[in-house]
Amino acid sequence: MNFKRRTHTCGELRTKDVGQSVVLNGWVDSRRDLGGVIFIGLRDRYGITQVIFDSEQNESAHKIGKELRSEFVVSVEGKVIKRPDDQISSDMDTGEIDVVVDSVTILNEAETPPFPIKDNVDAFDDLKLKYRYLDLRRAPLQKNLMIRHRMYQVTRNYFDKNDFVEVETPTLMKSTPEGARDYLVPSRLHSGRFYALPQSPQTYKQLLMVSGFDKYFQIVKCFRDEDLRADRQPEFTQIDVEMSFVDTEDVFKAVEGLMKVLFKQIWNKELQFPVQRFTFDEAVEKYGSDKPDIRFGLELVTLNDVFTNSEFKVFKDAVSANGIVTGFAATGCADYSRNQIDNLTEAVKNLGAKGLVWLKVKDKGLDSPVAKFLSDDEKDKLQENLNANQGDLILILAGDRMKTLTQMGALRLEMAKRLELVNEDTEPKLLWVTDFPLLEWDEETKRFYAMHHPFTSPRMEDVGLLDTEPGKVKARAYDLVLNGHEIAGGSIRIHDSGLQAKMFKALGISKEEAERKFGFLMSAFKYGAPPHGGIAFGFDRMVMIFAGLDSIRDTIAFPKTTSATSLMDESPSEVADEQLKELHIKLRNEKDS
C-alpha cells in the first residue's frame, strides 16, 4: 500500500505551523460526526491532533472519513489552521490548531477493541494484560516506558563518564541456589544437566574484578522463581555495579552521584546532601523497618526504661524477657472512636501482635483502660518520652524485639496513610542503611543463612565471632532506600579464600559443597583477587517510584501476573513431545505422582 510518510507527529503541530501542508499518520482516537463535518482525534505516542473532514472542502476525503472507526490506522494530508479562540482546548498540547484534510488513506481497519484506549480506562487487569499491546497504546503506560527509557540513558551516560565498562555476563549459567529458586534450563547436548537463569550476575562480576576490570556495570535481566507481589516479577532488571580497590565510601560516592543525576533529570529536583545514614539497628528501632520511609514523623520510641519496674503485666513481661516496649504518639488523634481503635488493633493482631495498648492524652490526663495500671511517674515519663501533647493518641506494642518492632513499623505506615502525611508534593527522601547482620538464623532448618549472599564480607572487627557467636557478626553491607522502598543493595565482598572458607563453614556449607557450587570462583581468588565491592539496583522498582506508581507491572512492557503467567501469549505453555524427547525429559503423569 502506498502512503505518504508523516511530516510531523500527532503531538508536534502548533500555531507557528498554521498554513503548512502536513502529513500525519496514526490511530483514530475519537470521532464526532456532525453531518457535513467530521472531527477525528488522530493519535500516536507523541500526542493527539484534531483533523477535520469537511464535505465543502473535499467531498471525497469526507466520504472516507465517514468510514473511520476507533483504532483504524490512517494517513492524512491537509493544511494546518488556527482554531477560533472559543474552541481552543487548553488540555491538549495541539489544542490551538486543527488540520483540514485534503486526502486520507486507511492503512488498516480495526475491530472494536475489548476496552477503550483512554487514559483512565475502567477494565479488569486480566483483560488489559491479555491485550497488553492495546493497553500500551494508552498515554499513561507510554509515559511510564518513556521514563524508563530516559533512566536507562541517564544511567549509561553517568557510568560511561565515570570510567565504568559495560560488560554482558551469561544468561545460561551454573545453578548455585542460595536465595530464591533458580529457573532451570535443560541441556539438549548434555543429558541430565541443566543451566540456570541468573538470579544475579554476582559471581561473574566478581570474576571481572579478578580479571582487572576495576569498574563494571551492566543493565541486566535477572530471574527468580519466587512468590510474586506488586513490586516483584519472575524476571526483573538490575543495574549491576562492581568496583575494585574500594571501600564502602567509594561505593556510596558513585551511587549518590547517579542518584543526583536521576533526581535532576527525571524529577527536576536537587538531591539533598549529605544523604542520611542509619545502621540496621537504628532503622529498625526508630522506624520498625530496615527500609524506613522518613518522609514523615511518627518515629518509634523504645520505652523499656519507662516501664523497668512496671506493675502492668504486658510491659513487665516484655521487659523481663529482654523484649521491647515501643510506641509513638499520633498527633491530634485523641478523638479516635472506639471503632477506629478496634480497627487498628485488628490490623496489628493480623500481623501477629497479641493486642494494642492505646492512651488518649486529654486535658485531665491519660484516658485509657490501662491507665489505672500505670503509676503517675510512668504516665509522666511516657508523655515526655513520646513528646505527646493534649489531643494526641499514644499507641504501644510490647513483646519479642524484632517481631514487635516490625509490627509497630507497619502500624506507623498505616497511621501515616490515615493521616495523609505523604502526598505527591512530599519531598522524596533517600537514605542508606548499613551494618546489617551478616547471618540470620532459620528455626525450621536450624542453620544460619546469609542475609545478603555468601560473598558478603563481615566487619573485620567481627571476624573472630564467626567461630563463636556468628549471630552477632555485622556485615559490610548496605541498602539504599528511597521513600520507604529498598532500591539497591550491596556490600564489600570477601576477596580472601581463607575468609571465604570461614564464611562457608558458618553457613554449614561443606568444603565439598562449596567446591561443587563455587569452585570456579574460589579458584579465581587464588590468582590475586583485588579488594572489591558493589551494589545492584532494582531498576523496575526505581522506575515505579520515579513514575509515581504503586506497582512495577506498569513499568514493564510485557509483565507477568502474580502467578507468573503471561495472559497475552499464554506462557508458560505445553511443548511438543518431540521437544521433550530432544531434551531427554519425560513428564510424569499426575495420577502416578
Image (cartoon, grey):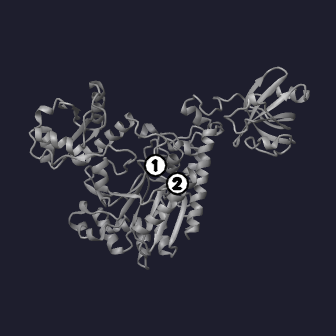
When asked about the image quadrant of residue 99, the answer is top right
Q: Which mark is residue 455?
A: none
- In the image, taking residue 67 as reference, residue 454 lies left or right, namely left
Q: Is residue 295 visible?
A: yes
Instruction: Provide the secondary structure element on which disc 2 rests.
Output: helix
Q: Which mark is residue 428?
A: 1
Q: Is residue 557 visible?
A: no
Residue, disc 2: 263
When asked about the image quadrant of residue 590, the answer is top left
- In the image, taking residue 124 as reference, residue 307 lies left or right, namely left
Relative depth, front residue between 63 and 2: 63
Q: Which amino acid type corresponds to the residue marked 1 in the rendered image?
A: Pro
When asked about the image quadrant of residue 31, the answer is top right
Q: What is the CA distance from the residue labelled 1 to the residue labelled 2? A: 9 Å
Question: What residue is rendered at 23% in x and 39% in y?
Answer: 396
Q: Residue lying farthest front?
A: 363
Instruction: Provide the secondary structure element on which disc 1 rests.
Output: loop
Please identify the quadrant where the C terminus is shown.
top left
Rendering coords of residue 473 (x, y %): 27, 63
Q: Are marks 1 and 2 in contact (CB under 8 Å)?
A: yes
Q: Which amino acid type corresponds to the residue marked 2 in the rendered image?
A: Phe
Relative depth, front residue between 176 and 405: 405
Rendering coords of residue 333 (x, y %): 30, 32
Rendering coords of residue 325 (x, y %): 20, 44
**Above or below — where is 214 with respect to 109?**
below
